Amino acid sequence: MKKAQAHTSFLDSVNSNFEKAAPHTGLPAGLLAQIKACNSVYQMRFPVKIGKDYQVIEAYRVQHSHHRLPTKGGIRYSQKVNQDEVMALATLMTYKCAIVDVPFGGAKGGVKISPREYTPAQLQKITRRYTAELIRKNFIGPGIDVPAPDYGTGSREMAWILDTYMSFKGGEIDAAGCVTGKPVNQHGIQGRTEATGRGVFYALKEFASNKDDMAKLGLTPGLAGKTMAVQGLGNVGYYASKISQDEGDVKIICVAEYEGAIYKEDGIDIDKLMKYRKKNKGSILGFPGSKTMKSRKDVLEVKCDILVPAALENQIRKDNASKVKAKIIAEAANGPVTAEAETILLKKGIVIIPDMYINAGGVTVSYFEWLKNLSHMRFGRMEKRFNQRTYHNIAETVERLTGKSIGEKEKSVLLRGADEIDLVRSGLEETMINSYNQIRDVYNKKKNIKDLRTAAFVCALNKISSDYLSLGIFP
Ligand code: GLU
């Protein structure tokens, strides 16, 4: 009973953020109510034979908004999956897609299982049956609803989904676009696995490049030398910290995982830590030179410049928010800060870079993958050689006119045509920079908006409402 009162539900928290932002848009109440509502909630139960027995599996797919199609969002495998959570996650997907100009509605799926308790063969059975249920109800398809990985799933599960879909709808020319986050050799795209983490890095880099915004926090501009604490070393946390360390010179001082948290003042090398964890029976504890913290939750209270909660929702709540000592919170996970906690954090002057923007790198690259599937061609195929030849001609002309020759090493950098991975990273970086500046503009222009989440909501609501208004639904 005490626990239930400790915090409001995830969906309540997302909707209370919506209510905070709605008055700043000046949009009519009916239109706001339509945007806020979850359009379709599909709750299913299906039997799967596990060992000798049948288990009844509980699963969901929620499509929050159909203002643009297909709808889009990952599938979560976790014992904690419930309808409220999947609805909240689907809702966030709608705003996320709008913020990064990905022309999709929001959706999310969930299967209530703990993946660790099943063999790969059993997981495959469950995934294929879940996909069949989605096909039966017309809840999947390249123009209908396109799943992707989320907590507890990855490219392996996406390959099973694709294969199941193909076996039902093999004749559809665009069938490969029915799911994203697929293995690269199964119609996937280079750079999708790292995309959410890389997006977090690009967003932080853009935030930190602004001298005035950093000065307000008592920080110098740029990421180099800034300290970071990371909760969760899953796909998102791992890539966010590794890329921040390798490409931004950020110092990771604290890391928390399921087994506990470690602290090392002079910095933790993320790759060395991952290798250590593998050898050490899956535990980060005891990493050379580090101190073990009392509880894994202590990561949230460490003194640092940037805190990256990259695990699950509802981590920073009203009971621990006052103990947070970071200057910037980068919401790599979905919903790690509750609406109640946010009020406390904002009063302390902490900047929260909101989930619906900062973790949108995954869906952005999913969009690129979907476009690749619909175009039936890899990015860079048409122009790579042409560009290389053009750069070569320019270099030759420069050499001829100056009488000097360009060194071989410089030449290899200058003359390179873009590959798929270069274009994906470039498209992702452009998206993260552009979207941040849209949010920052709203924040700076509207003086009564006091936080980046509200500004992000206003950006999203303006874009979604203009879709509805141009359809003439709300004259
Ligand atoms: N599950 C990821 C998210 O929460 C990715 C969704 C997608 O790529 O469709 O944004």
Image (cartoon, rainbow, N blue to C red):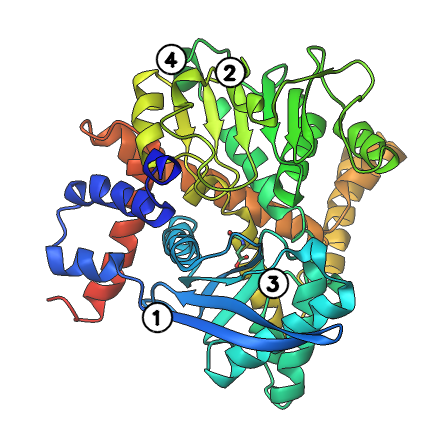
Tell me what residue is drawn at x 41 percent, y 58 percent.
90
Comes first in the chain, label 2 or label 4? 4
Q: Is mark 2 on a helix, strand or loop?
A: loop
Comes first in the chain, label 3 or label 1? 1
**Image x and y of residue 400, in percent:** 81, 38
What residue does disc 3 label? 369
**Comparing labels 2 and 1, the label whose residue is closer to the camera:** 1
Give whichever of 211, 19 is nearer the camera.
19
Q: Is mark 4 on a helix, strand or loop?
A: helix
User: What's the residue type where badge 1 is placed?
Assistant: Ser
Give whichever of 198, 421 is nearer the camera.
198
Question: Does residue 264 appear in the picture of this structure?
Answer: yes
User: What's the residue type where badge 4 is placed?
Assistant: Lys
Residue 216 image label:
4
Relative to 259, does residue 67 appear above or below in the rendering? below
Tell me what residue is drawn at x 71 percent, y 70 percent.
124
What residue does disc 1 label? 40
Q: In this view, does 219 lie to the left or right of 2?
A: right
What residue does disc 2 label? 221
